[in-house]
Amino acid sequence: MLRCYCVCMQEERDMVELRSGAYMPQIGLGTWQLRNTAQTIVDALRMGYQMIDTSGDYGTQPGIGEGLRRSGLAREDFYLVTKVEEDEDAYAAALNNLRELRLGYANLLLIHRPPARGAGVELWRALCQAQADGLTVDIGVSNYSTNLIDELIEATGEVPAVNQIEWSPFGYSDEMLNYCKEKRIVIQAYSPLTRTHRLRERELREIGFKYGKSPAQILLRWDMQLGVVPLPKANQRAHLEENLNVFDFELSESDMATLKVFNEEYSSLGSLAYV
Ligand code: NAP
């Protein structure tokens, strides 16, 4: 179980504790539409990224597996998140993900999105079984509303460790934030940089100027100070480095509040799945 990292990482950072007692890095690398995957993973791990997010449907798992092996890191020195699709045999999909990654276990396995009807209780039971069999340390969901999470808990008694959802100051939900705090579910923020669509907003840039930080860094820091774990994707080396360089400043309470007011339930993908 991941509790600390070896000295080969740039520096040991604070972790987020999951309800199971396992620890997750405070920021991770997204890999949807990542190009040149194996080399990017090698570079990112060398820079100090400790968590990688993928999914059976991203097509990046073989490249990630290759990059992890080339990095020479021991298994306990990185944190791997992957997902199964809502229309799959979830247990078989978990096994297939591990086969593509050439890993013995994932740190976190998620249902990628709820099925068209209901919460996917059978998918959730399959993930519980995968966890019991050691295919993953923790299990969770993605794109779930509070009602759908409640359905899973009522049916099985198992609370997801994580809900991975689209999240930025331009699109988030206080109701979800409070619900997850109360249930000790960690929110992972996907598309935390709004897929670049909102990075040029004047007020966001003005906050960045005050701290000598870019708009992207302000968005990532806002997540982290809320206790939310961002998963920015970056192909460019300068972006990879910039997105990790968010541990040396703190947003004031007043700037945190200003950013919160940006909320208009914005989604860079169409709509916030959980609202
Ligand atoms: P994102 O991370 O918000 O944005 C990625 C874009 O931002 C890329 O075009 C990237 O450019 C650019 N970028 C990165 N760092 C930057 C910086 N410092 N300054 C300016 N631009 C920067 O979008 P995302 O890929 O949609 O979301 C992140 C990850 O979340 C995904 O890769 C995936 O792992 C996960 N995700 C999960 C779900 C789900 O349903 N669970 C859905 C969507 C995404 P370059 O690539 O050119 O560097």
Image (cartoon, helix red, strand yellow):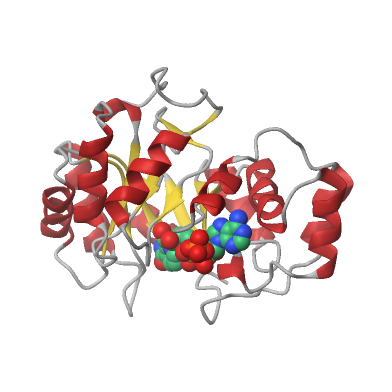
Query: In which quadrant will I find the N terminus?
Result: top left
Residue 57, compared with residue 179, is above or below; it is below
Question: Looking at the image, which residue is at 42% across and 27% down?
Answer: 21
Q: Nearer the viewer, residue 105 or 61?
A: 61
Q: Nearer the viewer, residue 55 or 19?
A: 55
Tell which residue pokes out farthest to the top in this image: 7
Q: Nearer the viewer, residue 84 or 176?
A: 84
Residue 253 x, y percent position in the rendering: 85, 43
Residue 161 x, y percent position in the rendering: 41, 44
Question: Looking at the image, which residue is at 15% across and 37% down?
Answer: 104
Question: Looking at the image, which residue is at 80% across and 53% down?
Answer: 208
Question: Looking at the image, which residue is at 52% across and 24% down?
Answer: 11
Residue 214, compared with residue 13, is above or below; it is below
Residue 230 x, y percent position in the rendering: 54, 50
Query: In which quadrant will I find the C terminus?
Result: bottom right
Regarding residue 148, the answer to whether it shows in the image is no
Q: Nearer the viewer, residue 213 or 136?
A: 213
